């Protein structure tokens, strides 16, 4: 592995760790020439999964595009980049487990929404507004209604002490 600083191909591995549920290996290296440290990552090469877009065009699955979509949904939320990367990796693993050759973009969107709904409610609503292409406020309200507190039943709201005495 060439050193990114001095470009000499002479280093040693200091530490090796599995990441992303064992799908990635991170190696911490030290250049023997300049003594600077750097990290390298090895990922399993996956088969070429094609995504079928809404217009029936096909393109290669892009994990970075998945990450960017989740990152946009989590914008200005108290969620670290590492947690977003972990979620994106989890979703990517699920996609590759379920589909071998082709997957519809709608199926990917549905998987992302399932994960975001338990990850962060605001990120879920943001993603849903783009994914489902909300046309008006009614669409928005319909999507968030399961997350709003439900009004109490009128019979539950009236307590025994609140009833007039006879």
Image (cartoon, helix red, strand yellow):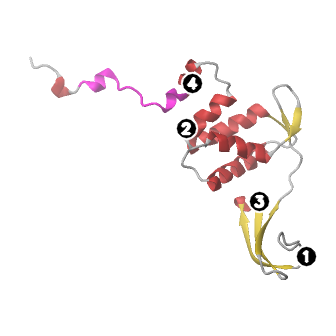
Q: CA distance from mark 3 to mark 2?
A: 29 Å
State the residue position of label 2: 122
Q: Residue at x 84, y 25 (%)?
A: 55
Q: Are marks 2 and 1 in contact (CB under 8 Å)?
A: no
Is residue 49 highlighted in magenta?
no
Residue 39: quarter of image: bottom right
Residue 18 image offset from top left, x and y in percent = 73, 66
Magenta residues, start to end? 144-158
Residue 152: quarter of image: top left
Q: CA distance from mark 4 to mark 3?
A: 37 Å
Q: Nearer the viewer, residue 39 or 155?
A: 39
Q: Assign a secondary structure to mark 1.
A: loop
Is residue 148 highlighted in magenta?
yes
Q: Are marks 4 and 2 in contact (CB under 8 Å)?
A: no
Q: Nearer the viewer, residue 69 or 92?
A: 69
- Dot 2 or dot 1: first in sequence order is 1
Q: Residue at x 64, y 56 (%)?
A: 82
Q: Assign a secondary structure to mark 2.
A: helix
Q: Label for residue 140?
A: 4
- Dot 1 or dot 3: first in sequence order is 1
In the orientation shown, which residue stands out farthest toward the left? 166
- Dot 4 or dot 2: first in sequence order is 2
- Dot 1 or dot 4: first in sequence order is 1
Q: CA distance from mark 1 to mark 4?
A: 55 Å
């Amino acid at each position: 592995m060439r050193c990114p600083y001095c470009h000499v191909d002479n280093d040693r591995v200091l530490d090796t760790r599995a990441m992303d549920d064992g799908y990635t290996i991170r190696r911490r290296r030290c250049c023997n020439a300049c003594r600077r440290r750097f990290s390298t990552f090895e990922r399993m090469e996956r088969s070429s999964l094609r995504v079928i877009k809404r217009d029936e065009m096909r393109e290669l699955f892009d994990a970075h595009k998945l990450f960017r979509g989740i990152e946009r949904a989590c914008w200005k939320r108290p969620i670290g980049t590492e947690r977003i990367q972990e979620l994106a990796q989890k979703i990517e693993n699920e996609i590759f487990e379920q589909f071998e050759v082709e997957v519809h973009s709608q199926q990917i969107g549905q998987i992302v929404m399932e994960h975001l709904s338990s990850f962060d409610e605001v990120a879920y609503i943001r993603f849903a507004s783009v994914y489902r292409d909300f046309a008006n406020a009614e669409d928005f309200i319909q999507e968030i209604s399961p997350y709003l507190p439900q009004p109490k039943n009128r019979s539950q709201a009236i307590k025994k002490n609140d009833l007039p005495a006879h």
